[in-house]
C-alpha cells in the first residue's frame, strides 16, 4: 500500500497521530509548565484540512480504499465540516478548561480521537468499519463528558451517555447482522445491489433497517431515543457539549444519509414513513420540552432534539434532494451550536458559568459584542432571516414539500414559531431585563473571540450568500448516489 | 451623485441604512451623540435620494428602476427589485417617516441611543426591501427580517409591559409568516416554473382547489399584519408599549405591508381564490371598521384610542381591496398613505404630550387650547385629516373606497359609512376632552408649547395632509396606471362565469378614476 492509496483515510490518520503527540507532549512537559496541546492540535487539524482540500482539487477525488473507505465529495464535504468543528472546539476550550481546573492535555487528545471516529463515520462504505468509527467517536466522548470528575452532574452525564450509547450500539449491531444475513455482505454497495434487486425484502429487511434506525436515532437524539440528551448536555463540560451538538450530530447524520439515502435508497418507501414519524415526534416533543426549561444548556439540548426533527423532515424527499438540503443545514447548525455553547463557555469564571436565562440579564449592555453574537445564533436557530438557519430550513422544508409532504413542512414551521418563544427568552434576558447583581463577566478570551467571530461569519454569510456551499452540497449528494 | 446612482437606485436606498447601522454599531460605547447624528444624517440622505424616484417615475403601469441579479440559480431565486405605482408612494412614505422618527426621538430616547439608531436604520432597510422586492424569496427575507429590529424597539425602549408586547408582536407575526412560506414552497412546486419571480408566477394558472389553500395561508399572514379583525389583538399592545418612534413606524409603514401584500402577491397570484373569498375579506374589513371605531370611542388612554382607530381606518383599506375595482384600490393605496401621515402625526403628538406630562390618560388633560395654542391648532388639523373631513387627505381616500366598493356590495358600503360617522365621533370627542374646556388639572397650567424641533416634525406631516387633500390628482395619476393594469390582469385570469355583482364591478373599472 503506497501513501497515495491511503488518501481516503489520510485526514483521520493525521488527526489520530496528532492525538498521540498531544498525549506524549503532555507526558514529557515538566510539572508547572503548560504543555503545547493547543498549538499541536491546531496544527494537526489544519494539516488535515489541507489534505482534504488538496484531495478535493486533485486527481484522487473520489478514490476508494479497499472498497471500505471513500474520499468522495460526500465524505470530503462532511470531513471539512468536522475538522472545522474540531478547530473551533479547540479554540473555545483553553479559557474554560483553565477556569474549571481541567487544563490538561486529555481534553485535546480525546477531542482529536473523537474527531477520528467522526471522520471515519462519514467516509466509510462498510458497516463494520462504520460501527468501529461510531465506537471510536463515542468512547472518546464518554470520557470527555465526565472530565469534570469533581462534579456529580458531569459523572451523571458520562454514565448516562455511556449506558444509552452502549444500548444503542447493540441495536445497531443487530441491524448490521440482519442486513448481512440478507445480502451476505457488510459492504454498502453489495447491500444496495441486493435491496435494489428486490431479492432482499420483507420483514427481515424492515427489521434490519429499523434496528439500524434505532441506533442512529440515539446518536442524533431524535425522539423517542432522546431521553439522555438533556442530562448529558447539561452535565458535560460546555465545550464538550458544543462538540456533541455540532460534531456528533453532523457525523451521525452523515452516516445516516450514507446508509439510508445512499445504500437503502431503493427501499425508501419502507423507511421514509418511519423517518417522517420520527421527524414529527422530535419537532413536537423537542420544542415543547424546550419551552419548559430555565437552564440554558437544557434548553439547547431540547432544541437540538427539535433540530434533529427538522433535519429528518428532508429524508422524505428524493435521496439527492434530501442529502443536499441536510448537508447544507448541518453546516449552519454546527456553526450556530458551537457559537451558542461557546458563548456560554466564554462566560465561565472559576468553574461557574451562566446556568439559567436570568444569569444573562443585562449582557446586552455589559458585553454588547458577545450578546450580539449570541443573538445572531438564536435568530438562526429560530430560522428567521438573514441567517444560515433560515436558508437551511427553507431547503429542508422545500425538499419535504417537493416530495408532497406539505403537512410535515407545516408542522416544522409551526414548531419554529413555538421555538421562537424560548429562543427569544434568552434575548429578552440579555437586552430587556435589568443587569443582575452577578455580572462580573470575565474578559472574552482571545481564542474564543476568534471562534465566535468565525461562527457569526458562517451564520450570516450562509444567510446572505448560500450559493457556493449549496453547489458543493449538491455535488456531495450526487456522489452519494454513485455508490 | 444622482447621475451615478440611477442604475441601482433601489439597492442604494435599501443598503444605505444597513450600512449606516453597521457603522453606528461599531462606534465606541460613549459615542451616543455621534450615533444619533449619523442615524439622522443617513436617513435624511436616503429620503433625499428617494426624491429622485418621484422625479423620474413615469406614470405608466410597468415596473421601473428595475434591477435583477441571479442569486440562487438552482432554485430560480434572484435579487430582483422594482417599483410601480403601487409601491412608489409606500417607499416614499418609508423614507419620509424614518428621519422624522429619529428627529422625534432626539430627546425622548435617553438609554442606549446608539442601538436605537441601529435598529431604526435596519428596520428601514427591511421595510424598503419589502416594497421593492420582486422575488418571493427576497420578499420573504425582508418581511421576516423586519421583525427583529421592531421587536427590539418595542422590547428595549417600550413602556412598562414592553416585553409581553414585544414577544406577542414577534410570535403573532411570525405565526402568520411561516404558513405563507409553506404556501410559497407549494406554489413553487405546483407552478413548475422553477422560479420565485413574482412577475413570472403571477402569469401562471393554478388549480383553483390548490389556490384556495395557498390564498388563505398568504391572507392569514397579511391579515395579521394589517391587522384585520379578529387578528388585531397584538396591535394595541404593541402600539401602547412601543416608544413613539416605534408606534409611528408601526402605524405608518408596517401596517401597510398587509394591504401591500394582498395587492402585490395574494390577489394576483391566486385570482380565483381571491374572488371566492372577497366577501369574507369585505365582511371582516367592515367588522373591523365598526369594531375599531366603537372600541376607540370608549378608550380612556390616548395612545390606545389612536391604536384602535388604526384598526378602523385599515378596515377601509381592506374594503377597497376586497371590492377590487380600480377606483376602490386607488382609494385603498391612497388611504394607506393618509393613514401613515395622519396616524403617524397623531402618535407623534400623543408622544409629545406624554413627554410633558408622563401620562396618556384623556381624563388628565382638558383646556390645553389656552396653554398650548400651537400644539392645539396642529392637533385639531391632524384630527380633522384623520376624520376624513373634506379638504384633507383622508376624505379623498375614504371617498374613493366607498364609491369604488358600491358595486361590490351596497350593504357593506352603507355599514362602512357608519364608520366614517363614528370616526368623527370618537376623534372630536377626544379633542373636546383634551383641548377644550377649563384647565381642571393644575399640572397642565404651565406646559411648554411646541419646540422648534417638534414643529419641524409636524409641519411636513400637516403640509402633506393638506396637499394630499387638495392636489390628490398629482398622486393618483401615478398610482392609477399600475392599479388598472393589475385589475385587468387579475380579471383576465379569472374564469368567465362570474356572479353578476362582480361583473358589474369589473365593468365599472373601464371608466376608471378619471371621472373623479
Image: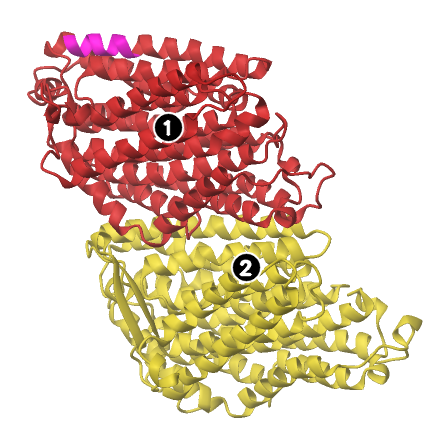
Chain colours: A red, B yellow
Residue at the spot 80% in from the left edge and 71% down from the top edge: B356
Residues packed near mark 1 inside 10 Å, few (<14), some (14 to 19) or many (20 plus): many
Please tell me whether residue B292 is drawn above or below residue B42 in the rendered image. Answer: above
Q: Secondary structure at mark 2?
A: helix
**Mark 2 → mark 1, Cα distance in angstroms:** 35 Å
Residue located beneath label 1 in the image: A41
Identify the disc placed on residue B88: none
Magenta segment: does it hold A236?
A: no
Magenta segment: does it hold A173?
A: yes
Magenta span: A172-180
Q: Nearer the viewer, residue B516 or A26?
A: A26
Q: Chain of mark 2?
A: B
Residue B512 shows in this picture: no
Where is residue B421 drawn, in percent x and y? 65, 77
- Say whether marks 2 and 1 touch (CB < 8 Å): no
Q: Nearer the viewer, residue A353 or B300?
A: A353
Residue at the spot 42% in from the left edge and 73% down from the top edge: B13
Same chain shared by disc 2 and disc 1: no
Residue located beneath label 2 in the image: B25
Q: Nearer the viewer, residue A17 or A275?
A: A17
Amino acid at each position: 500500500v503506497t501513501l497515495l492509496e491511503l488518501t481516503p483515510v489520510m485526514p483521520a490518520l493525521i488527526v489520530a497521530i496528532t492525538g498521540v503527540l498531544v498525549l506524549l507532549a503532555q507526558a514529557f512537559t515538566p510539572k508547572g509548565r503548560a504543555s503545547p496541546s493547543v498549538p499541536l492540535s491546531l496544527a494537526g487539524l489544519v494539516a488535515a484540512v489541507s489534505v482534504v482540500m488538496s484531495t478535493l482539487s486533485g486527481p484522487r477525488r473520489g478514490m476508494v480504499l479497499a472498497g471500505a473507505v471513500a474520499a468522495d465529495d460526500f465524505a470530503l464535504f462532511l470531513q471539512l465540516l468536522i475538522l472545522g468543528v474540531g478547530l473551533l472546539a479547540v479554540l473555545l476550550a483553553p479559557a474554560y478548561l483553565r477556569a474549571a481546573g481541567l487544563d490538561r492535555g486529555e481534553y485535546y487528545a480525546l477531542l482529536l480521537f473523537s474527531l477520528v471516529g467522526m471522520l471515519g463515520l462519514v467516509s466509510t462504505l462498510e458497516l463494520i468499519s462504520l460501527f468501529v468509527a461510531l465506537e471510536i467517536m463515542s468512547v472518546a466522548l464518554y470520557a470527555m463528558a465526565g472530565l469534570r470528575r469533581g462534579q456529580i452532574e458531569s459523572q451523571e452525564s458520562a454514565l448516562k451517555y455511556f449506558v444509552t450509547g452502549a444500548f444503542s450500539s447493540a441495536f445497531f449491531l443487530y441491524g448490521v447482522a440482519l442486513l448481512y444475513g440478507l445480502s451476505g455482505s457488510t459492504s454498502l454497495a453489495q447491500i444496495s445491489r441486493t435491496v435494489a434487486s428486490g431479492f432482499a425484502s420483507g420483514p427481515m429487511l424492515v427489521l434490519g433497517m429499523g434496528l439500524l434506525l434505532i441506533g442512529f436515532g440515539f446518536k442524533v437524539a431524535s425522539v423517542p431515543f432522546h431521553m439522555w440528551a438533556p442530562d448529558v448536555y447539561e452535565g458535560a463540560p460546555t465545550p464538550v457539549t458544543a462538540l456533541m451538538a455540532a460534531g456528533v450530530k453532523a457525523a451521525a447524520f452523515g452516516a445516516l444519509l450514507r446508509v439510508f439515502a445512499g445504500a437503502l435508497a431503493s427501499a425508501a418507501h419502507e423507511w421514509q414513513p418511519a423517518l417522517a414519524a420520527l421527524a414529527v415526534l422530535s419537532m413536537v416533543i423537542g420544542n415543547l420540552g424546550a419551552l419548559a426549561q430555565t437552564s440554558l444548556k437544557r434548553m439547547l439540548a431540547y432544541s437540538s432534539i427539535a433540530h434533529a426533527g427538522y433535519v429528518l423532515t428532508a429524508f422524505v424527499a428524493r435521496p439527492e434532494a434530501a442529502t443536499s438540503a441536510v448537508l447544507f443545514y448541518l453546516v449552519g447548525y454546527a456553526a450556530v451550536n458551537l457559537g451558542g455553547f461557546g458563548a456560554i463557555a466564554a462566560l465561565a469564571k472559576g468553574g461557574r458559568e451562566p446556568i439559567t436565562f436570568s444569569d444573562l440579564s443585562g449582557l446586552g449592555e455589559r458585553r454588547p459584542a458577545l450578546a450580539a453574537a449570541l443573538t445572531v445564533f438564536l435568530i438562526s436557530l429560530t430560522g428567521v432571516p438573514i441567517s444560515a438557519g433560515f436558508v437551511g430550513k427553507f431547503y429542508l422544508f422545500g425538499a419535504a414539500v417537493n416530495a408532497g409532504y406539505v403537512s410535515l413542512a407545516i408542522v416544522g414551521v409551526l414548531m419554529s414559531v413555538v421555538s421562537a418563544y424560548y429562543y427569544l427568552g434568552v434575548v429578552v434576558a440579555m437586552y430587556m431585563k435589568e443587569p443582575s447583581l452577578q455580572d462580573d463577566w470575565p474578559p472574552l478570551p482571545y481564542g474564543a473571540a476568534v471562534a465566535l467571530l468565525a461562527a457569526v461569519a458562517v451564520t450570516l454569510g450562509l444567510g446572505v450568500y448560500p450559493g457556493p456551499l449549496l453547489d458543493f452540497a449538491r455535488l456531495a449528494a450526487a456522489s452519494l448516489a454513485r455508490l | 451623485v444622482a447621475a451615478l446612482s440611477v442604475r441601482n437606485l433601489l439597492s442604494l436606498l435599501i443598503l444605505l441604512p444597513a450600512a449606516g447601522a453597521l457603522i453606528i454599531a461599531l462606534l465606541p460605547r460613549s459615542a451616543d451623540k455621534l450615533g444619533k447624528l449619523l442615524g439622522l444624517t443617513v436617513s435624511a440622505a436616503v429620503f433625499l435620494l428617494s426624491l429622485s424616484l418621484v422625479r423620474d417615475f413615469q406614470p405608466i403601469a410597468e415596473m421601473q428602476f428595475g434591477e435583477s441579479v441571479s442569486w440562487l440559480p438552482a432554485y430560480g431565486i434572484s435579487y430582483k427589485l422594482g417599483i410601480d405605482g403601487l409601491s412608489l408612494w409606500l417607499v416614499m412614505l418609508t423614507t419620509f417617516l424614518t428621519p422624522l422618527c429619529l428627529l422625534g426621538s432626539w430627546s425622548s430616547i435617553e438609554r442606549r441611543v446608539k442601538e436605537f439608531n441601529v435598529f431604526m436604520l435596519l428596520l428601514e432597510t427591511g421595510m424598503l426591501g419589502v416594497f421593492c422586492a420582486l422575488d418571493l424569496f427576497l420578499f420573504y427575507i425582508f418581511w421576516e427580517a423586519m421583525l427583529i429590529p421592531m421587536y427590539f424597539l418595542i422590547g428595549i425602549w417600550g413602556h412598562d409591559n414592553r416585553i409581553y408586547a414585544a414577544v406577542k408582536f414577534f410570535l403573532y407575526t411570525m405565526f402568520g409568516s411561516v404558513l405563507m412560506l409553506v404556501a410559497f414552497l407549494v406554489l413553487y412546486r405546483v407552478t413548475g416554473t422553477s422560479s420565485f419571480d413574482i412577475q413570472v408566477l403571477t402569469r401562471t394558472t393554478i388549480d383553483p382547489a390548490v389556490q384556495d389553500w395557498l390564498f388563505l395561508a398568504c391572507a392569514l399572514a397579511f391579515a395579521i399584519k394589517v391587522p384585520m379583525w379578529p387578528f388585531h389583538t397584538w396591535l394595541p399592545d404593541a402600539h401602547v408599549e412601543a416608544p413613539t418612534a416605534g408606534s409611528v413606524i408601526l402605524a405608518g409603514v408596517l401596517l401597510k405591508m398587509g394591504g401591500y401584500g394582498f395587492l402585490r402577491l395574494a390577489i394576483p397570484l391566486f385570482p380565483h381564490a381571491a374572488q371566492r373569498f372577497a366577501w369574507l375579506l369585505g365582511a371582516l374589513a367592515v367588522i373591523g371598521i365598526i369594531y375599531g371605531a366603537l372600541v376607540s370611542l370608549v378608550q380612556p388612554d390616548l395612545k390606545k384610542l389612536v391604536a384602535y382607530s388604526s384598526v378602523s381606518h385599515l378596515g377601509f383599506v381592506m374594503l377597497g381591496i376586497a371590492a377590487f375595482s380600480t377606483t376602490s384600490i386607488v382609494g385603498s393605496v391612497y388611504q394607506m398613505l393618509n393613514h401613515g401621515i395622519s396616524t403617524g402625526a397623531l402618535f407623534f403628538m400623543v408622544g409629545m404630550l406624554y413627554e410633558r406630562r408622563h401620562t396618556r390618560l384623556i381624563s388628565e388633560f382638558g383646556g390645553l387650547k389656552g396653554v398650548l395654542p400651537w400644539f392645539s391648532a396642529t392637533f385639531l388639523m391632524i384630527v380633522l385629516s384623520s376624520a376624513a373631513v373634506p379638504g384633507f387627505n383622508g376624505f379623498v381616500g375614504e371617498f374613493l373606497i366607498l364609491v369604488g366598493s358600491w358595486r361590490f356590495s351596497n350593504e357593506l358600503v352603507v355599514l362602512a359609512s357608519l364608520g366614517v360617522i363614528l370616526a368623527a365621533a370618537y376623534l372630536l370627542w377626544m379633542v373636546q376632552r383634551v383641548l377644550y374646556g377649563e384647565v381642571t388639572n393644575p399640572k397642565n397650567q404651565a406646559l411648554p408649547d411646541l419646540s422648534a424641533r417638534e414643529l419641524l416634525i409636524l409641519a411636513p406631516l400637516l403640509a402633506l395632509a393638506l396637499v394630499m387633500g387638495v392636489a390628490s390628482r398629482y398622486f393618483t395619476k401615478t398610482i392609477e396606471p399600475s392599479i388598472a393594469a393589475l385589475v385587468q390582469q387579475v380579471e383576465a385570469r379569472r374564469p368567465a362565469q362570474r356572479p353578476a355583482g362582480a361583473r358589474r364591478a369589473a365593468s365599472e373599472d373601464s371608466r376608471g378614476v378619471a371621472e373623479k
